[in-house]
Image (tube, rainbow, N blue to C red):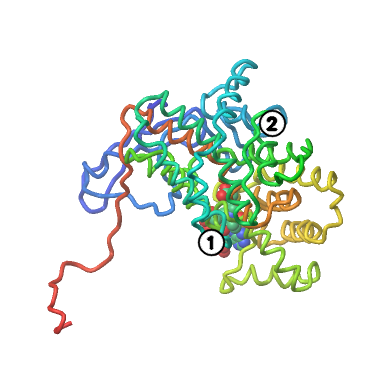
């Protein structure tokens, strides 16, 4: 980062003006460094929701929301989605460069050798109700990994951090598949390490011990693409949560569990599930004929209804991931002969109507990746409740890469936001009889 410019901040209450350094990254908006404001003026800055605040410096992922651009370590998502697979993308996010063939082979072997989870983990799953939401189960079970890998882990040691990353990448597919199997009452499937990362995951989810699982390359490639597109997204809510949790020096597996909890919400990763529920709901009420009614509800601010899978805090032109996911959607539906699926037809009609409607045009609301990823996942056979778990599986690498970057910073500090207090001024506690 370079710092050649500065900003002058002046006050109307007599506080002396101060100069603030302006940092320039390699791309993106300049950043006004406000760290010294409180010390110099006794004032905080106020930015709930981080609308104008860069919470960290990072070299991993870059988004230009106006251009609809997403780069992992400088590489456009469109190229990665076509030329690389998920594990190569993971290597890139973690190490900063794409792997050579030898590095790729070594990385894959390291990941695939760690896919089994401790047999005791089975007991954690069986403690949950069968009808528990798989995301609830995942939050618990990934958090529980910290109990298995704590004493042997020194987060200040780069090799230990790398081993944690490998363990997480390796064990997440197994845990997500176990959450699914437990939910549907089928036996857990052990990983099969000679399969590719995504094929192994699909086998653990959809295979049973009774018959040989037939890998379908088109469907595996579609899943792999979902994973690449969701692998990282700079400082979103769940990643910021992982960084904040990690800033206290907490166990990385526990930090990832915190990220999973944040991802679960419908405004974030839960949108793919919410989007499918929305489509199901419109379908039940009459399908395509009822889209008009639904859009009217969305426009009525009092209804609290949103068009799920539309809109994004950063992308105000289009979401590049959505474009790729839309292509994958067509490929998968072609492969499975599902083009006449009523829900898919409804989704495409709703998309078309919304894209032509002034309400959405004026607010720059476009489909985001979750509008299509739910449809693809449904076609692959995942039940709706599993959609966000698949997102969590894919995002794990982003979380752990961002966590590692933060821990490696020489002047890393615990995250500690301040507040604008509007509650009661000091008052006396009265004995209970006088209250
Ligand atoms: N449906 C209807 N209106 C919307 C929608 C939507 N999906 N999204 C935003 N708006 C309206 C919003 O009501 C506001 O209108 P007005 O200016 O009249 O008050 C305007 O558009 C600006 O929206 P905002 O709420 O200020 O935007 P935000 O940046 O705070 O929220 C968002 C971004 C993603 C939370 C929001 O667009 C949303 O809730 N979308 C639906 C959920 C969704 O699909 N989330 C997945 C995001 S992509 C996956 C990920 O990376 O997590």
Count of labels in the image? 2
- Does residue 209 appear left or right of residue 115 in this picture? right
Secondary element type, mark 2: loop
Q: Is residue 167 above or below residue 376?
A: above
Q: Which mark is residue 418?
A: none
Q: What is the crowding at mark 1: few (fewer than 14 residues within 10 Å), some, or many (at least 20)?
A: few
The image position of residue 384, as x and y in percent, is 66, 57
* Observer-nearest of 187 and 235: 187
List the single residue furthest toward the bottom.
Answer: 433
Determine whether the residue tagged by mark 1 lies in a helix, strand or loop: loop
> Disc 1 beta carbon < 8 A from ligand 1?
no
Name the foreground residue: 154 vs 72: 154
For the C terminus, which image quadrant? bottom left
The CB of the residue at mark 2 lies under 8 Å from ligand 1: no
Q: Nearer the viewer, residue 18 or 311?
A: 311
Q: Which residue is mark 1?
A: 129
Q: Position of residue 272 (x, y in %)?
A: 64, 54
Q: Quadrant of ligand 1?
A: bottom right
Question: What quarter of the picture does the N terminus occupy?
Answer: top left
Q: Is residue 178 visible?
A: yes
> Disc 2 designates what residue?
195
| Distance CA(mark 2)–CA(mark 1) | 31 Å
Task: Tell me if mark 2 has few (under 14), some (14-19) or many (20+) residues whose alpha carbon lies within 10 angstroms of its own.
Answer: few
Q: Earlier in the sequence, mark 2 or mark 1?
A: 1
Q: Is residue 135 left or right of residue 350?
A: left
Nearer the observer, 223 or 106? 106
Name, please, the residue furthest toward the front: 210
Residue 9: quadrant of the picture = top left
**Residue 310 picture location, percent across and down:** 64, 55
| Residue at x 14% of width, y 84% of height | 433
Q: Is residue 312 visible?
A: no
């Amino acid at each position: 980062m370079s710092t050649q410019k500065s900003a002058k901040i002046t006050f109307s209450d007599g506080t002396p003006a101060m100069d603030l350094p302006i940092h320039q990254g390699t791309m993106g908006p300049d950043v006004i460094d406000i760290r010294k404001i409180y010390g110099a003026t006794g004032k905080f800055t106020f930015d709930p929701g981080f609308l104008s605040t860069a919470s960290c410096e990072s070299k991993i992922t870059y988004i230009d929301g106006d251009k609809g651009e997403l780069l992992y370590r400088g590489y456009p998502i469109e190229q990665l989605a076509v030329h690389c697979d998920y594990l190569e993308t993971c290597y890139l996010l973690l190490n900063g460069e794409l792997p050579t063939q030898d590095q790729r082979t070594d990385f894959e072997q390291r990941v695939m050798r760690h896919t089994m989870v401790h047999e005791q983990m089975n007991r954690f799953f069986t403690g949950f109700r069968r009808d528990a939401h798989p995301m609830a189960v995942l939050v618990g079970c990934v958090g529980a990994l910290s109990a298995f890998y704590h004493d042997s882990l020194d987060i200040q040691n780069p090799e230990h951090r790398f081993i944690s990353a490998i363990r997480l990448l390796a064990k997440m597919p197994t845990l997500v598949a176990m959450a699914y199997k437990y939910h549907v009452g089928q036996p857990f499937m052990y990983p099969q390490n000679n399969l590719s990362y995504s094929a192994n995951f699909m086998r653990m989810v959809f295979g049973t011990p009774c018959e040989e699982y037939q890998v379908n390359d088109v469907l595996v490639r579609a899943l792999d693409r979902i994973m690449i597109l969701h692998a990282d997204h700079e400082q979103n809510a769940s990643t910021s949560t992982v960084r904040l949790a990690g800033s206290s020096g907490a166990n990385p597996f526990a930090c990832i569990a915190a990220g999973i909890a944040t991802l679960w919400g419908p405004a974030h990763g839960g949108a793919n599930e919410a989007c499918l529920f929305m489509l199901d709901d419109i379908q039940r009420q009459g399908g395509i004929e009822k889209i008009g009614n639904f859009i009217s509800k969305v426009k009525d601010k009092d209804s609290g209804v949103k068009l799920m899978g539309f809109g994004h805090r950063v992308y105000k032109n289009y979401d590049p991931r959505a474009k790729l996911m839309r292509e994958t959607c067509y490929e998968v539906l072609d492969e499975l002969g599902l083009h006449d699926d009523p829900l898919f037809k409804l989704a495409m009609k709703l998309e078309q109507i919304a894209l032509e409607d002034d309400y959405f045009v004026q607010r720059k609301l476009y489909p985001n990746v979750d509008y299509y990823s739910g449809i693809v996942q449904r076609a692959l056979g995942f039940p709706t409740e599993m959609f966000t778990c698949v997102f969590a599986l894919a995002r794990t690498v982003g979380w752990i890469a961002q966590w590692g970057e933060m821990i490696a910073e020489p002047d890393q500090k615990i995250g500690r936001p301040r507040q604008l207090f509007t509650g009661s001024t000091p008052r006396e506690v009265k004995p209970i009889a006088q209250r």
